[in-house]
Image: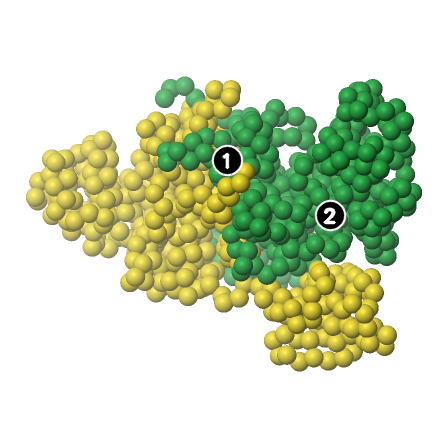
Chain colours: A green, B yellow
Amino acid sequence: MSEKLSVLPYKGTRDFYPEEMRLRNWFFGVIREVLEKSAFEEYGGPMLESLDLYAAKSGEELATKQTYNFTDRGDRRLAIRPEMTPTVARMVAGKMNELNFPLKWFSFPNMYRYEAPQRGRLREFWQLNVDVFGCDGFEADLEVVTSAIDLLLAFGADENMFRVHINNRRFFSDVIAAVTGKDAEGSRAISKVVDRRGKVPYDVYKKDLIALGLSEDEIAKLDSLYTMTVEEATSLCPESVGAQELLSLFSLLTKTGLAKYCVFDFGIVRGLDYYTGTVFEVFDLSPENNRAMFGGGRYDNLVGLFVKNAKVSGVGYGMGDVTLENFLRTHNLIPESLTAGVKVLVTRFPDAPYEAYLNLADALKKHGVTSSLYLGEKKFGKQLEYAVKENYTHVLIMGGDEYARGVVRLKNLATREEKEMPFVDALASLLS
Amino acid sequence: MSEKLSVLPYKGTRDFYPEEMRLRNWFFGVIREVLEKSAFEEYGGPMLESLDLYAAKSGEELATKQTYNFTDRGDRRLAIRPEMTPTVARMVAGKMNELNFPLKWFSFPNMYRYEAPQRGRLREFWQLNVDVFGCDGFEADLEVVTSAIDLLLAFGADENMFRVHINNRRFFSDVIAAVTGKDAEGSRAISKVVDRRGKVPYDVYKKDLIALGLSEDEIAKLDSLYTMTVEEATSLCPESVGAQELLSLFSLLTKTGLAKYCVFDFGIVRGLDYYTGTVFEVFDLSPENNRAMFGGGRYDNLVGLFVKNAKVSGVGYGMGDVTLENFLRTHNLIPESLTAGVKVLVTRFPDAPYEAYLNLADALKKHGVTSSLYLGEKKFGKQLEYAVKENYTHVLIMGGDEYARGVVRLKNLATREEKEMPFVDALASLLS
């Protein structure tokens, strides 16, 4: 091999050098703390799954087009997971009789989608998945919406930065039926057009609805719904179960003080067919990034793909790491430094024995001080430069002279202060 | 789709239900703490890499045989990473002029190998990778061996449970040259036979050496080396640089008190061609699992695959999660319970308003108490059962009567003790 290999990561994927990794670990840490405080439990699944899992949920064509898929030597059709929902549905189905419902589960796996990389969309990304399984009531819907809000608040966001747009698929169908007389099938077709509404010109949206047989009058009625409050909208179909669910959810959001983060939005339907009740999308309110960041909703029978006559309801959402990072950067919510606490470099000189340095480093380690002995034999200036670049907060200095006198010098890299003292005093100062 | 999908994970991969995930998170947590205390920094890389990365290091045949590989729609040959070293070498090469050497890096990625699943070997596994880049001296070798020992000690292991077997590739070649007169090429061929020594009958080992041209006498000389101490062995080639490196390393291991975990072993050569100096393998000492668990060593020029004339030395090791788990289970080092701390279930009754329960749960959350409101409307007995199964430590009980009187009952699930008190007292008791 005389030709050199490329140093670039594969298209649409990222290298995480320690600086980027600290950020990813910070995301994970904040998320894990928030969710575990609310008694959500973490799970994980394999990176490779049977392609059939995605074909059953999204259709063969979409599944093969959007995933990295191939056949193994045992002729199994595999895909690198493009989402976590089929995996978690399979896991729930696999232990349906042992699991203790309702489950409050989360995961933060990496996944791959075959698409052209662009802002906010990469081929490899991490996606938080939060779900409640086995609770049919509005309590689970509230829990899931609350957890999404809690997460953003934990990252320092406030009500000026995001808004949770909420609707209900059952309510949507009932309204469509009332306005247009269409059945469930017709309502699904209309929902696809409504879902694209914000992404296409109004003319296109309108033409698509006309193509589905809607009159000018019906379209005008639909349009008026997009600006209605939840009370106004639900009064159009007061006996709809979906309307009752919406009113219960909003009433509880008000009582728990979360209503200020939420708004009813008849235009939220979520593209996927499997949603059956509450649906929501979280919008970034910043003018330069105003769009849906992530969303979710209630889906009632994914487990049924695996187990005959099984019915385990689910409600949840997924949030990508790239989306989260964009949001936090837009609102200046990423701390300047993610390295925290004391970190000590023991510098090294040729005129004291190496084991004396090893002993210092070992004593620091045994007392729980984050520390390292400088590896190598560079000049002191170089060692100091290394300490600064690598975010060390202190250096411990001991030349042959200090070694002979049984002292060290402790230098604080922030204040540039340097003081000679016995090692035990330096240790005490670092621990204080 | 009337035929149901399989609930099993893909062959050789695992589902991590919350219980298994807690174990994996515990592994990660202990490892991260140990390594970060010693100022190692975490990095991460993509799951997919160019297949050429592995072909350049291990040869086309091995690379395609042992990896999951395929061609994307842009005709790029890709592989799911079977190991981390090529990725990290690529990353170091990619920022060679910006990085601050010596680097102390670690990562704990998942990876895939195409092999028949068996004890200790799965198709998907996680592998800790610890490396020091850019330090040519024995200091880095010591640092890396020390970190491997520190890790096992942090998991509760002691010197009766494991032993680090250490050798040096340079020393090995020098001894082979002295005993057999073979050059570097011949030494490499012999090293492959020595590497398999523990895995094949002695006769096979001997026949393989004879096939390489060794005499009975030379084989006997080699055999005597396997039981020698480092002093005895190095005295055979005192002027070998490798011998000096071995003596320095063992002398420092003695001075830092780590010698009791280590032993010189001329039979350790590591199969891979790229090792150039110190090599080591960590053995489980339990009779039922006595074998090499993991290992590593010094490799001097992987970055050279990417950058012309570049030379960045590396020394490190990799440890798989399945191996670690087997070791910890064998020695009973996995704590009985990995769930820790107070976790409170707020139970629910139909005769108090739902928002009253939401308020209790919210107050607990705001005070940092891990807690959840029971989701659903099951009977109290069912809620209690749920709490026990889901590792809750307490339940908070408030029926209509308690609600009217402004009190709650706090039940400790370990002691079965239950007491009525105002909520503020219950909160104080949970926080104490």
In this rendering, position of residue A309 left or right of residue A154:
left
Q: Residue at x 49, y 31 (%)?
A: A69
Q: Based on the displayed image, in which of its 4 quarters is residue B373 positioned? A: bottom right
In this rendering, position of residue A137 left or right of residue A216:
left
Residue B276: x and y, percent? Answer: 33, 37
Foreground residue among B104 and A317: A317
Foreground residue among A51 and B322: A51
Q: Residue at x 58, y 48 (%)?
A: A303
Q: Based on the displayed image, in which of its 4 quarters is residue B279 positioned? A: top left
Residue B295: x and y, percent? Answer: 36, 47
In 3D space, how far apart are the residues under numbered discs 2 and 1 (Cα atoms)?
Answer: 30 Å
> How many C-alpha atoms fall within 10 Å of the one at disc 1: few (<14), some, or many (≥20)?
many
Task: From the image, tell me which residue sits under label 2.
Answer: A148
The N terminus of chain B: image quadrant: top right
> How many C-alpha atoms fall within 10 Å of the one at disc 2: few (<14), some, or many (≥20)?
many
Numbered label attached to residue B245: none
Numbered label attached to residue A51: 1
Give above or below for B273 relative to A239.
Answer: above
Asked whether the viewer can see residue B131, the reply is: no
Give above or below for A417 relative to A177.
Answer: below
Name the secondary structure under disc 1. Answer: helix
Point out the tag, 2 or 1, that comes first from the N-terminus.
Answer: 1
Residue type at mark 1 is Leu
Residue type at mark 2 is Ala
Q: Based on the displayed image, in which of its 4 quarters is residue A56 positioned? A: top right
